[in-house]
Image (spheres, grey):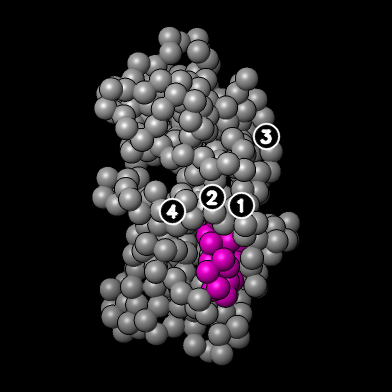
């Protein structure tokens, strides 16, 4: 099979495709013939050796793939050859075949195609963890989403809209603002300009009758974290999703105390170990909302597997609007 191999961490374009034997699979694993692969910001970090987890080289990277089960290990009960599945693994998805633990695989329902499934898995699972499991968002609440035209941002906007929340998106360009509106943003604030801090404060207060927002979903970190924390109202929650700006911020404990605020994390990967059944529910919810037309994958572009470096340049160049998908075969 063809697969991207990281021999040594370095720039994304320095990694090469190689022909490798098909992966072996353990008793609790499923061997999948990959049809489509979703790219994510954390993949870009991993390829460069900047992700929090740094697998030992050489290895095949990649986390999101959709395809057809070719074979299953002796301990696998939930899947059989021929099943259409989506998997979210820690490594191995940038290849024509991947071995995935069954606890990281989910059935694709009829009516969902491979490209959409691959595009949705990490971003909607992340949004589900943030919106439903961590924030426990409710209809009628006002929620701010930063980096709202990115993969996770758009998924969060759509999930919030589907449950009846009011949404404020923060994005860096008019093009991204239009995309955020198409995906459920009731109001958009542009993040460029030197007065961004004051503008976010003014616009959020105007939209909330001076109460402040109930929830923030922050994918950007850096100054955006502080700028949105200060517009939360009484009992507000800021949910940390990621640090796309590359800047990990900190919060002053006295500020949280004084304003009755909570800052909570929404990590995806550890949910599979701790709350697997809830993740199965989340994937079912996403596919159900997709079939009802309430959420969509927002695929910006689809390229062949071998064009992986070109595809990643859209993500690292901050040009991506929605998702980039690679196809196999
Ligand atoms: N919690 C978890 O388990 C989990 C899971 C998946 C992803 N994440 C994290 O969530 C964040 C978003 O991921 P994603 O896949 O949605 O990424 P994405 O599609 O590339 O979107 C990221 C957004 O962040 C904004 N941004 C601000 N500064 C940036 C910079 N210096 N470089 C690139 N983008 C920048 C951009 O929006 P503007 O141009 O509008 O500012 C961009 O649309 C990342 O930090 C990722 O690591 C966390």
The residues tagged by marks 4 and 3 sit, at their Cα atoms, a distance apart of: 25 Å
* Numbered label attached to residue 287: 2
Q: What residue is rendered at 57% in x and 57% in y?
A: 289
Q: Quadrant of the C terminus?
A: top right
- How packed mark 1 is, by other alpha carbons closer than 10 Å (few <14, some 14-19, many 20 or more), is some
Q: Which residue is mark 1?
A: 291
Q: Which residue is mark 4?
A: 282
Q: What residue is rendered at 34% in x and 60% in y?
A: 265
2 or 4: tag closer to the N-terminus: 4
| 294 or 91: nearer the viewer | 294
Give the residues in magenta.
Answer: 152-172
Residues tagged 2 and 4 counted as in contact (Cβ below 8 A): no
Q: What residue is rendered at 65% in x and 25% in y?
A: 304
The residues tagged by marks 4 and 1 sit, at their Cα atoms, a distance apart of: 14 Å
The answer to whether residue 184 is visible is yes
Is 135 placed above or below 319 here?
below
Task: Point out the residue furthest to the bottom here.
Answer: 209
Nearer the camera: disc 3 or disc 2: 2
4 or 1: tag closer to the N-terminus: 4
Q: Which residue is mark 3?
A: 302
């Amino acid at each position: 099979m063809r697969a991207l191999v990281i021999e040594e961490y370095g720039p994304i374009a320095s990694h090469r495709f190689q022909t490798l034997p098909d992966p072996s699979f353990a008793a609790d694993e499923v061997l999948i013939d990959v049809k489509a692969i979703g790219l994510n910001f954390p993949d870009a970090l991993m390829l460069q050796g900047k992700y929090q987890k740094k697998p030992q080289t050489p290895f095949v990277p990649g986390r999101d793939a959709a395809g057809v089960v070719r074979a299953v290990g002796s301990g696998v009960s939930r899947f059989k050859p021929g099943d259409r599945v989506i998997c979210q693994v820690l490594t191995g998805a940038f290849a024509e075949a991947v071995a995935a633990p069954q606890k990281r695989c989910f059935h694709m329902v009829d009516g969902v195609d491979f490209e959409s499934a691959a595009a949705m898995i990490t971003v909607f699972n992340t949004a589900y963890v943030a919106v439903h499991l961590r924030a426990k968002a409710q209809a009628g609440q006002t929620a701010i989403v930063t980096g709202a035209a990115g993969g996770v941002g758009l998924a969060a906007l759509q999930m919030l809209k589907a449950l009846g929340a009011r949404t404020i998106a923060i994005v860096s360009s008019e093009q991204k603002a239009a995309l955020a509106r198409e995906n459920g943003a009731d109001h958009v604030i542009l993040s460029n300009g030197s007065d961004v801090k004051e503008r976010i404060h003014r616009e959020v207060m105007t939209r909330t009758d001076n109460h402040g927002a109930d929830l923030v979903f922050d994918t950007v970190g850096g100054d955006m974290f502080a700028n949105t924390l200060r517009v939360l109202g009484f009992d507000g929650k800021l949910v940390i999703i990621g640090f796309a700006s590359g800047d990990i911020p900190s919060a002053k404990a006295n500020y949280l105390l004084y304003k009755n605020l909570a800052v909570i994390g929404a990590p995806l990967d550890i949910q599979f170990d701790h709350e697997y059944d809830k993740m199965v529910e989340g994937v079912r919810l996403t596919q159900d909302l997709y079939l009802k037309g309430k959420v969509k994958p927002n695929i910006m572009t689809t390229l062949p597997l071998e064009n992986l470096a070109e595809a990643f340049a859209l993500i690292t160049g901050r040009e991506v609007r929605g998702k980039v998908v690679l196809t196999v075969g």
